[in-house]
Image (cartoon, rainbow, N blue to C red):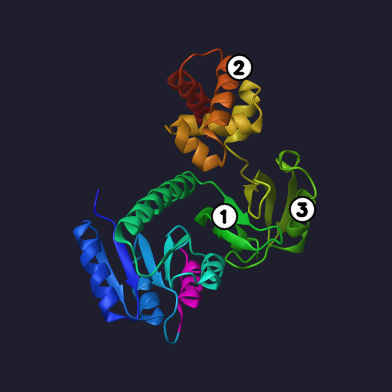
Amino acid sequence: MPPPTASSVDDSPDALFMLSDALTLERMDVLTCNSGRQAISLANSGSPDIVLMDAVMPGLDGFQTCQILKAERGFEDIPIIFMTGFNESEHVVRALAAGGVDFISKPIELNELFARMRVHLGNARRARSARRALDSTGRWIVACDRNGRIHWSTQQAADLMQRAGIRSDQGAYLPWEIVELVGLAAEQLPSAALGQALRYSRNGQDLEFRILSDDGNDELLLRLVDRHRGTDEEPLAKAFALTLREAEVLLWIAHGKANKEIADILEMSPRTVNKHLEQIFNKLSVEKRTSAATMAVRVLWRDS
C-alpha cells in the first residue's frame, strides 16, 4: 500500500516546514500550501488523503477553503483537520460546521496529531471502500438532509437523476415531491420510515426513491430504482421469500463482501448483518456463506 498523502495548508512558512518535516518522518507524502487558493488549485490536480488546515489565513480563510473543497466531487470522504489557536472555541464550532472532522490546538503536540490522523485516515479508507463498492455494483444511492439538500451520491445515482432532469451536485436540492417524502419520514421513528417509497417520472424516466437508512439524525440515505430495469434484490427476495433488506445482504454476500464491509455499505451494525444472515441461512436451508452466494448467483444469472 502506498504511503498516505497529507496536505498541509498554513500561511506561516515556519509552521509548514515543521509539519512537512514531521509528516515525512512519519512516512507520509507531503503537499504544502500557503493559502486557501493554492490548496484548491492543488486539490483539482490530485486529491490528498488528509488535509491539515490552518483556520486563520489572509484571503480565503480555512473555513471558506474547507467548504469549497468539500463541494468538489471526490473530496467528500477526505478528512480535514483544523489547526486552531488555543482555546478558540468559536473556531472549533466553525471548523465542524464547514465540514472539518476534527481540530487540534496550536502549538501542535505532534504525537496527538499523528494519533488523530491515523484514526481519520482509517475511517476515510472505510468510507471510500464502501462508496467504491456501491459505485462498482451499480448501487444508486443519494444521501441528503431532512430538507432534501444533497450531501453526496454515487455516480450511477447522479447520472440517473440527471437523465430525469434532477440536479445531482452536492448542495443541490431534490424536487419538492421527494423532499415531502423525506419530511414525512422525519415525523416518524427511523425504523418506521425505512422502505417508504415515491415514484417520480420525468423525461421518459420512471424512478422510485426509497428510504434506505435513517439514523434519526440529519442524514438519510435514499435508494433510487430505475423501474424500467428493476433491482437485483427483487428476484432474490421473490426466489427465497426474503425481505428486501435480507435480499440486499444476500446480494453483497454474492459479491464476496465480509460482514463488516456489508455493515459499512448498508449503514447497519455488524450485529444486524449477523441477524439477517441467520434468517437468510434458515430460508435457504444452508449453513455456509458460499452456499448462499452460489444460490444467489444462480438466480441472478437466470434473470440477467
Q: CA distance from mark 2 to mark 1?
A: 31 Å
Q: Amino acid at mark 2?
A: Lys
- Tag 3 and tag 2, C-beta contact below 8 Å: no
The residue indicated by pointer 3 is 181
Q: Amino acid at mark 1?
A: Ala
70 within the magenta span: yes
Query: Against 304, is 193 above or below?
Result: below
Say which residue appears at 70% left-offset and 57% top-offset: 146
Say which residue appears at 62% left-offset and 21% top-offset: 240
Assign the magenta stretch its main secondary structure: helix
> Residue 122 appears at what percent x and percent y?
38, 48
The residue indicated by pointer 2 is 283
Find residue 157 and name its label. Answer: 1
Extent of the magenta region = 60-73
Label 2's element? Answer: helix
Q: CA distance from mark 1 to mark 3?
A: 18 Å
> Residue 256 appears at what percent x and percent y?
42, 32
Residue 133 in sight here: yes
